[in-house]
Image: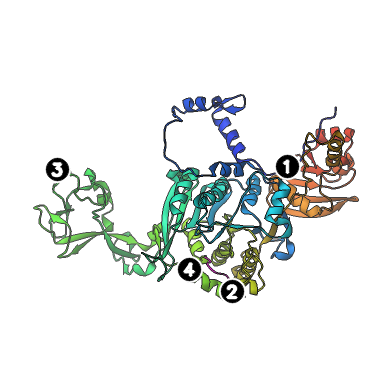
Amino acid sequence: MTKQIPKVATTSVDPLQDKILEMRNVIPEAFAENKIDWNKLRETLGEYVDMGTEKYGLNWAGKSNAFKAIRVPATGTLVPQESESVNWDTTDNLFIEGDNLEVLKLLQRHYRNKIKMVYIDPPYNTGKDFIYKDNFTENTSDYYERTGQSKGGIKLSSNMESNGRYHSDWLTMMYPRLFLAKNLLKDDGVIFVSIDDNEVANLKILMDEIFGEENLLSQVVRIAKTTSFRGNFFAPRKDYLLCYSKNISELKNFSDEVDESQYKKVEINGNRIGEKYRDDIAFYLSTLETRPNQRYFIECPDGSLVVPPGNTFPPEKPKEGDGVWRWNKDSFESKKDFIVFKNTKSSPLIDKNGNKANWNIYTKSYLNDKIIDGNLPSDVLTGFLNRGGTSELGDLEIPFDFSKPYKLIKYLLKIIKTEDDDIVLDFFAGSGTTAHAVMDLNAEENANRKFICVQIPEETDVKSEAYKAGYKNIAEISRERIRRAGKKLLEDKADINNPRASAFDSGFKSFKLSQSNYRQWSVVTDKDDEQKLKRNLKLFAEKPLVDNYEERSVVYEILTKEGFDINSKVEEKTVKNMEVWVVSGLEKRMFITFAKTLTELNLKDLNISESDIVVCLDSALDDTIKVNLMRNYNVKSI
């Protein structure tokens, strides 16, 4: 019997199975008969877990469905929309219209461990917003009929507060999406999730479970409004940003911009003469822990000795509550040039007799050092009000409510130190705020960050200004916002004397999630006759693709599911009367042909290297050619 040529992937990867394989490589002794032996795993890790014992965690009705959602592979495909795109041939930015759960699965094979930052602003669970309704038991045809993807829309359901699964449905929606997003993050990647009071407590526990409590960076408060007339007991003016790292040990410190206006003094002595500095940073802080090597006498200009407030005096060992200096004694001696003494009547310091000292001590902070190191960003953000987002969209003449200000996301991009070639993902793209932020920062720095934005085509309200303006769904608004923002940034940055000033990527490739080009198997039950089964098998063998398929769409489905970059260069060529699609990735190429017959001579004409992949119709090969091709080429069939 002739050995079969391997088939191309027809679905996305199984993220959980990938994790199991990774674990098997690290802890093979925890597996028996190709399955995890949980007792052996616990023994290997030196831990015993009594499953009958109560433990801390978050459980809800439907959590098992969230895990099912992760396991169900994506069968859909991304259909290119060149007419909706800007600079298709040169851009590296992506906009994808469709259900983000399906899209996140399709991104797994290539983009896993490659995303630097994820920002999402998911639907707040207010009882009025819409949420995604995932069904994990229906077949593919039912799914597309229900979701309406074949008709260009997505059916959504309101999650009313009267629903007994009000919180559960929202958590079930969020869990698989956050799980898949974590897989996509680089080891030094960061995720920010905007959320309000309704779900912030549940979301934090959920993200603790997925990302690990140790990777929580902050629960940032954002002041959203300066005034508010809603609420019964307090007027709500804030929301939150939950911030987690993929692996905190791989993460560099965040840094905020430096306010140079605070550095008004100029050094007149020493080797830093001429540099700007400030000296209002107290050398003593009452908030520091008591440390014996940081409580010692310092001699002031008049010869007096001072120490932070407390009940002990050096060389006596300090007690709890005694103040300490910022540095230990050795650091103080080596960095005396940074010390400033100020004569004052309000010093918190005491002399050797316990009386109030006449001096206070500060440290100098040089501007040049701060520019390099930056300031730690605050966990309370005050400069990014909701009305900023409204104003930004107004400038672009885009009618849309409740958009976050793009300057908020731009600020996040800055403080985590994103740089050239970093990829930023937003899978609740809304009006395209994240894409706008990435382009604006790139234009400002002549940089080359890339964005991937995903937005479900949620229909706009027929009474809304957006609908009246011609936008039938939010995905249309998002694409148009990206177009207008890119164009405006190009106009603002245009400089006839500096062509590079407008060299940033202001385009995007647009794709739409659609049904697979691969023919879907019709289930044959016991009641069906054998002839029907044979007809199905014959149909799949002879026509593995749907009727009236478009070759370009099939090519993009193959490259996505085979793990190529969606931004790979795709060309249609004719090589000695054979039509072939060439997909050029960073390390390898893929040649795809839909020829009815294929010979080894055809492949020789393509100059295929050992790393290249050839994809063809299985029906185009006879048994003899299959043997020769498998011996000489990396061939896969459809």
Q: Could you tell me which quadrant the C terminus lies in?
A: top right
Q: Which residue is mark 4?
A: 386
Q: Nearer the viewer, mark 3 or mark 1?
A: 1
Give the image location of residue 473, x and y in percent: 65, 65
Earlier sequence position, callout 2 versus callout 1: 1
Earlier sequence position, callout 4 versus callout 3: 3
Q: Which residue is mark 3?
A: 316
Q: Nearer the viewer, residue 577 or 225?
A: 225
Say whether residue 289 is visible: yes
Position of residue 303 in the picture relative to residue 31 (left or right): left
Above or below residue 606? Residue 417 is below
The secondary structure type at the circle numbered 3 is loop
Q: CA distance from mark 4 to mark 3?
A: 55 Å
Q: Nearer the viewer, mark 4 or mark 3?
A: 4
The secondary structure type at the circle numbered 1 is loop
Amino acid type of disc 4? Asn
Q: Quadrant of residue 268?
A: bottom left
Q: Nearer the viewer, mark 2 or mark 4?
A: 4
Above or below residue 624? Residue 509 is below
